Image (tube, grey):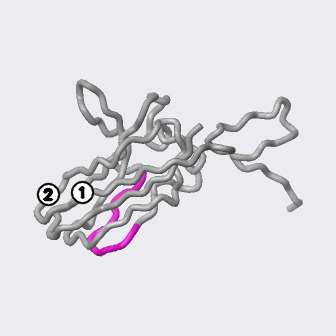
Amino acid sequence: MGVVKKYASSGVDPSVTPPSLKPVQMRAGRLKQLCGVATVANGDSATSTHEFGEIPSSCIINPASLLEFTALTGVIDYDLGLGKKDDVNGYVAKSVNCLIDGADIHTAGSKGLTGITPANRAKRAWEIAGYADDPGGNLTVMGTQNADATADGSIALTLDYATE
């Protein structure tokens, strides 16, 4: 096989005329951060949710973002996903687990955003959530506890993302 030169999704191929402009979030975006801590009480049941806040639908999420947690005994399945709020239905999840799917958080530790695979790194939040088109505005970051908690504790999310 010969030597090849390839361009990443953030690079510009000079042989393409006119050069395709990459989204600013990929080449020179402004890094922002959503930080939130949710408390969990002993007895919080499965399907309890934790709203961490909102991010722009057009942002690019850093997969190195981190979910940290104390020992939440019993919680062996935790999801982190994205959805949209509206005045009629409240919060409507598009994907309950597009950022983290089925994390075991019953012992203290941390998890990266395992749902953002290498193939999804250059995708915008709305694409990762599974929307066909950008719904515009903000998406809500929501955690779902899929098992009963048998201990008090907390879950902290530090989500880094790039915007225009």
Nearer the observer, 139 or 120: 139
Numbered tag placed on residue 71 in the rendering: none
Disc 1 crowd, CA 10 A, few/some/many (<14, 14-19, 20+): many
* SS for callout 2: loop
Q: Given the image, on which type of amino acid does mark 2 rest?
A: Ser
Name the residue at 59% across, 44% down: 30
In the image, the segment drawn in magenta is 99-110
Nearer the observer, 45 or 157: 157
Numbered tag placed on residue 45 in the rendering: 2
* SS for callout 1: strand
Q: Can the viewer see residue 95?
A: no
Q: Position of residue 8 (x, y in %)?
A: 72, 50
Q: Position of residue 96 (x, y in %)?
A: 33, 47
Residue at label 1?
A: 145
Q: Which image quarter: residue 70?
A: bottom left
Q: Is residue 151 magenta?
A: no
The numbered mark, 2 or 1, whose residue comes first in the sequence reads 2
Name the residue at 83% across, 29% down: 18
Nearer the observer, 106 or 118: 106
Name the residue at 41% across, 49% down: 98
Q: Are marks 2 and 1 in contact (CB under 8 Å)?
A: yes
Q: Given the image, on which type of amino acid does mark 1 rest?
A: Gln
Q: Position of residue 15 (x, y in %)?
A: 87, 39
Alpha carbon distance from label 2 to label 1: 8 Å
Q: Quarter holding the N terminus?
A: bottom right
